[in-house]
């Protein structure tokens, strides 16, 4: 029986897998030809975007995926956001008839929240303070709260999850 | 070259990857803060919820992913489902160019019992293949729930699914 530990695994997550509650969202071509985006139109509003971390999990401790960081590629168009903040949610699934339980693991982010809201292309990297193996009864959601100014538009190109695979 | 045989692999499938037909669906926050869901509006109709099982496949026999079971997390939020909620597992053999796909049904069982799938409550339904299958590169698996809402319509929130499999590489 073999054994693999690869510390350089990554997984692209397409923007159409993002959960985009409320507001008016559309799938459109990206600003760069041949790219794709999930686009939110201009409005003075706050929208919540969740990036589902779609990587393998494992029911055995210290096996499967060890989540290290998540990178989100997006572009803010026309006007800066009033705020752009990130929270990482770890969801422990409920048994039948029981609710899920959510905790918020600590992380650092780059660039800063102030620099994440400017008109520009952005690559937001959220790094767990303590990387964690994902149990089969758990999943992670990166929640982005986007407080748009009146004319702000945002294009989400996708995300990349970086993890260690041990199987 | 190594050899991997891990019988404890799982894969979360977010609700945004689900396919819904004959239903009015919206993306909203889940009942528990920090969760996400796809919300089905109340309607006395038959809705089909298809979960694409997004795990690796392999063109070599007895390699890749060996699908064992799929779990669906959802909540009947405003009322019971009056009629039924029934899962079926489909294996779709992709067609060659100019040829149609060929679909077969894989025998399966599920827990909890049918009556409990209809309750106004959080539900975790586990669909287990009677005979687990290796997934060929020309095959994919869909787990389809047929939701016959019946009188009252009822509403649901779909939180996501988890596929359980053996990985052999």
Image: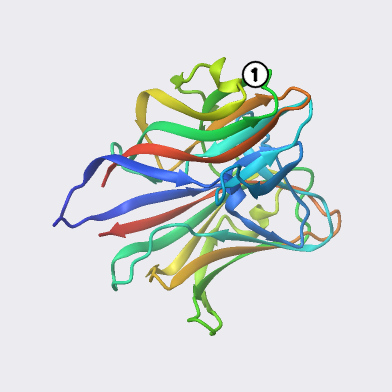
Q: Which residue, as the protein is rendered here, is positioned at the far front?
A: A33
Q: Is residue B110 visible?
A: yes
Label 1: element kind? strand
Residue B22, by quadrant, is bottom right
How many numbered marks appear? Answer: 1
Image coordinates of residue A86 in percent, x first then y, are 55, 24
Image coordinates of residue A75 in percent, x first then y, are 59, 33
Q: Is residue A99 visible?
A: no
> Measuring 32% from the left and 63% from the top, which residue is drawn there?
B64
Which subunit holds the residue at mark 1? Answer: A
Residue B75 shown left or right of residue A14 in the figure: right
Depth check: give the residue in front, A118 or B158: A118
> Measuring 55% from the left and 48% from the top, which residue is drawn there?
A35
Image coordinates of residue B156 in percent, x first then y, are 72, 48
Q: Which color scheme is applied? A: rainbow
Looking at the rendered image, the quarter that the N terminus of chain B falls into is bottom left
Residue pointed to by mark 1: A83
Relative height, residue B65 to residue A103 (above, below): below
Is the residue marked by circle 1 packed among few (<14), some (14-19), or many (20+) residues within 10 Å?
A: some
Image coordinates of residue A150 in percent, x first then y, are 78, 24
Residue A71 shown left or right of residue A102 in the figure: left
Residue B34, by quadrant, is top right
Relative height, residue A92 to residue B15 (above, below): above
Residue B80 shown left or right of residue B166 in the figure: right
Residue A81, by quadrant, is top right
Relative height, residue A146 to residue B73 (above, below): above
> Measuring 28% from the left and 36% from the top, which residue is drawn there?
A62
Depth check: give the residue in front, A94 or A114: A114
Looking at the rendered image, the quarter that the C terminus of chain B falls into is bottom left
> Measuring 86% from the left and 58% from the top, which residue is drawn there?
B151
């Amino acid at each position: 029986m073999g054994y693999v530990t690869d510390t350089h695994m990554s997984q692209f997550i397409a923007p159409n897998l993002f959960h985009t509650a409320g507001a008016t969202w559309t799938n459109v071509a990206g600003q760069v030809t041949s790219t794709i985006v999930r686009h939110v139109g201009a409005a003075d509003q706050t929208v919540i975007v969740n990036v589902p971390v779609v990587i393998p999990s494992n029911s055995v401790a210290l096996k499967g995926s060890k989540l290290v960081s998540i990178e989100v590629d997006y572009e803010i168009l026309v006007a800066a956001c009033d705020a752009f903040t990130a929270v990482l949610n770890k969801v422990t699934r409920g048994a039948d008839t029981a609710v899920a339980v959510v905790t918020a693991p600590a992380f650092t982010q780059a660039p800063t929240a102030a620099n994440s809201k400017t008109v520009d292309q952005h690559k937001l990297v959220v790094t767990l303070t303590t990387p964690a193996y994902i149990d089969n009864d758990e999943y992670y959601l990166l929640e982005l709260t986007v407080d748009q100014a009146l004319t702000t538009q945002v294009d989400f190109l996708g995300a990349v999850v970086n993890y260690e695979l041990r199987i | 070259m190594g050899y991997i045989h891990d019988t404890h692999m799982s894969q979360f499938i977010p609700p945004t990857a689900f396919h819904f037909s004959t239903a009015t669906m919206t993306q909203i926050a889940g009942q528990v803060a920090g969760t996400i869901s796809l919300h089905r509006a109340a309607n006395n109709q038959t809705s089909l919820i298809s979960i694409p099982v997004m795990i690796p496949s392999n063109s070599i026999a007895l390699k890749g992913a060996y699908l064992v079971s799929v779990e669906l997390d959802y909540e009947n939020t405003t009322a019971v489902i009056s009629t039924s909620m029934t899962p079926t597992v489909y294996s779709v053999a992709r067609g060659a160019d100019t040829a149609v796909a060929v679909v077969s049904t894989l025998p399966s069982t599920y827990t909890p019992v049918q009556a409990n799938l209809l309750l106004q409550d959080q539900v975790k339904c586990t669909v287990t293949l009677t005979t687990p299958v290796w997934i060929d590169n020309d095959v994919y698996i869909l787990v389809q729930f047929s939701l016959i809402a019946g009188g009252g319509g009822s509403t649901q929130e779909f939180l996501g699914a988890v596929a359980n499999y053996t990985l052999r590489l």
